Structure formats: C-alpha cells, structure tokens
Amino acid sequence: MSTLIDARPEWADQDTFEADREKMLRYGTSIGMTIEDLMRITDPDVILWLWAAAEAKTLECEKV
C-alpha cells in the first residue's frame, strides 16, 4: 500500500481511497473483469493503471 500512497498521496485518506476503489471496481467490471479478478490484483502498477483508466472514463462521460 505504501507504493500506492507514494504515487497517490490522497489515498492515505481511507474515504478517498474507498471512493476511488469503487470507481476502479465499476470500471473493471464494465470491461469484463469479475470482482474476484479485481480483488486479486496486488501489483501497484496494475492498480494505478486501473485507476487512470477509470478516471479517463469518468472524464469522458462528463464531457458528453
């Protein structure tokens, strides 16, 4: 977790992390991943990629 907090210091706040985690889970399931698959992810690079993709999708939807 420290690697993730180093990359995203705001994730030190549990509420912020949980909100972003929910966003990542929604995005992951929208691209066909199962909750079980998502919960097994431990690689910080993959987690950060998932967060970035979820953020990009959110921004894309806000533009419409």
Image: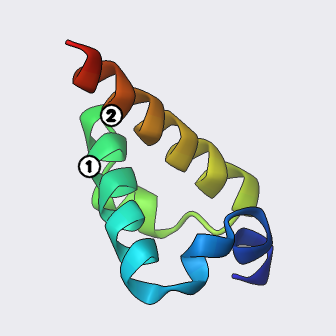
Other-residue count near label 2 (Cα within 10 Å), few / some / many at <14 / 14–19 / ≥20: few
- Judged left or right of residue 60, residue 47 is right
Residue 44 in percent (x, y) is at: 72, 62
Furthest-left residue in view?
64
**Disc 1 residue crowd, few under 14, some 14–19, many 20+, Cα 10 Å:** some
**52 left or right, relative to 4:** left
**Element under disc 2:** helix
Residue found at the very far top of the displayed protein? 64
- Which comes sooner in the sequence, label 1 or label 2? 1
Question: x, y percentage for residue 28?
Answer: 36, 44
Residue 63's image quarter?
A: top left
Which of discs 1 and 2 lies nearer the camera? The answer is 2
State which quarter of the image contains the N terminus: bottom right
Mark 2, residue position: 58
Residue located 42% across and 40% down the image: 54
Left or right: residue 12 compared with residue 5 = left
Relative to residue 41, is residue 61 drawn left or right? Answer: left
Under circle 1, the secondary element is helix
Q: Residue at x 56, y 75 (%)?
A: 11
The quadrant of the picture occupied by the C terminus is top left
Q: Nearer the viewer, residue 36 or 59?
A: 59
Label 1 – label 2 distance at C-alpha: 11 Å
| Residue 61 position within the rendered picture, expressed as x and y whole percent measured from the top left | 25, 23
Vertical side of 31 occupied by 55: above or below: below
Between 9 and 27, the one lying in front of the other is 9
Q: Residue at x 33, y 68 (%)?
A: 19
| Amino acid type for the residue under numbered disc 2 | Thr
- Give the image's coloring scheme: rainbow
Q: Which residue is mark 1?
A: 26
Question: Where is 20 relative to 9, above or below?
Answer: above
Locate residue 15: give its quadrant.
Answer: bottom left
Q: Amino acid at mark 1?
A: Arg
